[in-house]
Amino acid sequence: MNVSDRHLRFGWWSLFTFLALGLVLESLHGLKFGWYLDVGYEMRRLMLTLSHAHGALFALVNIAAGLTLRTVKEFTLGKSASLSLIWGSVLTPAGFLLGGLFIHGGDPGIGIVLVPIGAVLLLLAVFSAARSL
């Protein structure tokens, strides 16, 4: 599979996954689940919303990268940049998700440590892509 196809496939499946997560979150809200809506769980609600939003955004970034690779001849995305984009797109929303599923009082769970790792990977990938153009 070439790099363009990998980012398109990853992007579309990620978009499906995080849109489905958004539907679950809306259902929890609509059905008034205390686990999600009670005052003591504001951090959970925030972390899960951030996971949904970042996951959907990074899915679109991967789709854009795949389409750019197909349409702009001068654009290249090296293997390390491609892997950084994919892993950053996994780790950042996963960190928010895990941080929200396992909260401790008013603080997110330990999974939140994945967020800055994913953010750095994404930053490196976008820098590489911008430099390539």
Image: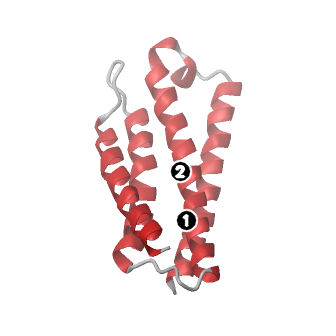
Q: Is 130 on the left or on the right of 120, as rendered?
A: right
- Helix or strand or loop: what does disc 1 sit on? helix
Q: Quadrant of residue 98?
A: top left
Residue 128 image point, x, y percent: 39, 69
Q: Which residue extends farthest top? A: 39
Residue 12 image point, x, y percent: 63, 65
**Residue drawn at x 50%, y 12% as measured from the top left:** 39
**Residue drawn at x 37%, y 79% as measured from the top left:** 79
Amino acid of disc 2: Gly
Tag nearer the camera, 2 or 1: 1
- Helix or strand or loop: what does disc 2 sit on? helix
Query: Residue 28, which numbered label?
Result: none
> Closer to the N terminus: mark 2 or mark 1?
2
Residue 78 image point, x, y percent: 39, 79
Q: Quadrant of residue 103?
A: top left
Q: Residues within 10 Å of mark 1 (few under 14, many from 20)?
A: many
Amino acid of disc 1: Asn
**Residue drawn at x 51%, y 86% as measured from the top left:** 2
Q: Residues within 10 Å of mark 2 (few under 14, many from 20)?
A: many
Residue 111 image point, x, y percent: 32, 41
Q: Is 94 on the left or on the right of 69, as rendered?
A: left
The residue tagged 1 is 62
Q: Nearer the viewer, residue 61 or 34?
A: 61
The residue tagged 2 is 55
Q: Nearer the viewer, residue 34 or 2?
A: 2
Gap in Å between the C-alphas at discs 2 and 1?
Answer: 11 Å
**Residue drawn at x 42%, y 40% as measured from the top left:** 96
Vertically, is 87 above or below 94?
A: below
